[in-house]
Image (cartoon, rainbow, N blue to C red):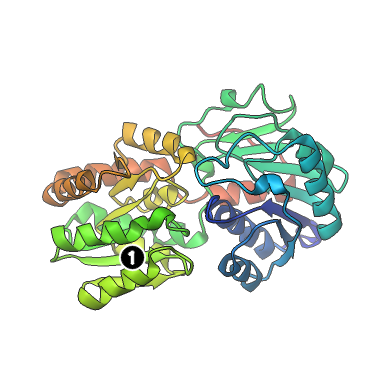
Amino acid sequence: MTEAAARQRVLFRCDASEAIGGGHVMRCLTLADALAEAGAEVTFVAASMPGPLEERITRSGHRYVQIAASPELDRAPGHWEEPPLSAEAQLADAQATGVAAGSADWAVVDHYLLDAHWHSAARDFASRLLVIDDLANRPYDCDVLLDQTFGRSRADYRDLVPDKANILTGSAYAMLRPEFARERPAALKRRREAGPVRRILVSMGTVDPAGITARVVEQLVEAMPECAIDVVLGPQAQSLDQVRRLQERHPQVSVHVDARNMAELMRDADVAVGAAGMTSWERCCLGLPSIVLVLAENQSLIAQRLAETSAHVVVPAQDLGALVEGLCRLSESQTLRVVMAERAAEVCDGSGVEKVRALMAHKHEAVSLD
């Protein structure tokens, strides 16, 4: 650990809720843990944070501070991504963040409703700014822009950031916890051997929008009763109680709440059913053949790019019949699963968080690896 890393102070500004989901917090936590391991002092600032995620932040050893939420943050699911908060609301939020967290070497911002108004105001208390995004839809005043979407181009942001901003794009920068890179060799070996489908992983996201997990599991236990089904849910997931009742009736169903062994669950699964969100990169790293549903508008580009490269099969969220059909097709074709595993593994190798951590620690220039 270097002396510079030990002194480094980093604040994260992100929110989570039923409307927002938990993906922004989870990818920030991955980076925060890597920075803290290198000696940085980390503070999370939020205006909205479910209790289990707040607990996860503090249990990781990071400081957590809650600030007052702007009334403009109260938006319905599916419509919260844009437009950004008003300039006045962003200025108030930035000022509250600075008061709550104090000065920082880096401010890391992962929030669709904050743009250059917030970023510029944050320069009063942060020496440098890193913005994590995947929309490319507004101006950003930052030193580093990170978009880990597969196939995203630096050109998508060139006119939205300052000339000197460092633009990091593409899944080479996908930030995964270290255990995914650690489990990658064993997982890829298992994919190459391609035995029959015996275990299915279901993970629709921390929040479980509209309680879709229970409906998916109901379809799977009927269509593939011979398979073990691992279901990953957050503690506040809408369909948690319903899935637990399914577990009581169907012994092949195992429920994992706030799972800390996701890499192992993915390694041991033969196929997966999941949302086209942040876990897409985890599945790709481990070469896990997957049926993917788009549960939020910001997942559309991820799903489209992964489908184009045959890394995942995408089905409409409202068409669970197509989900079962796609899963049966995967189950019946060993060749299809092997090809999909190979294509997925090419997307992401699990080293992205170390690239970003190194850039922040040593302040060197980095280039896109698209």
Image coords of residue 18 (percent x, y): 52, 55
In the displayed structure image, the side of residue 88 where residue 168 appears, left or right: left
In the displayed structure, 157 sits above or below 143; it is: above
- Residue located 70% across and 54% down the image: 12
Residue identifier under label 1: 231
- Residue located 69% across and 40% down the image: 114
In the displayed structure, 341 sits above or below 31; it is: above
Quick one: label 1, few (<14), some, or many (20+) residues within 10 Å? many
In the displayed structure, 117 sits above or below 211; it is: above
In the displayed structure image, the side of residue 67 where residue 219 appears, left or right: left
- Residue located 88% across and 44% down the image: 124
Helix, strand, or loop for circle 1? strand
- Residue located 19% across and 63% down the image: 221
| Residue 196, picture quadrant | bottom left
The kind of residue tagged 1 is Val
In the displayed structure image, the side of residue 150 where residue 164 appears, left or right: right
* Residue 359 appearing in the image: no
| Residue 188, picture quadrant | bottom left
Q: How many marks?
A: 1
In the displayed structure, 293 sits above or below 103; it is: above
Q: Which of 327/105 is in front?
A: 327
Q: Which of 78/289 is in front?
A: 78
Q: Which of 282/353 is in front?
A: 282
Image quarter in which the N terminus is found: bottom right
Image coords of residue 34 (percent x, y): 62, 59
Image coords of residue 161 (percent x, y): 70, 28
* Residue 323 appearing in the image: yes
Image coords of residue 241 (percent x, y): 37, 71
Q: Which of 283/241 is in front?
A: 241
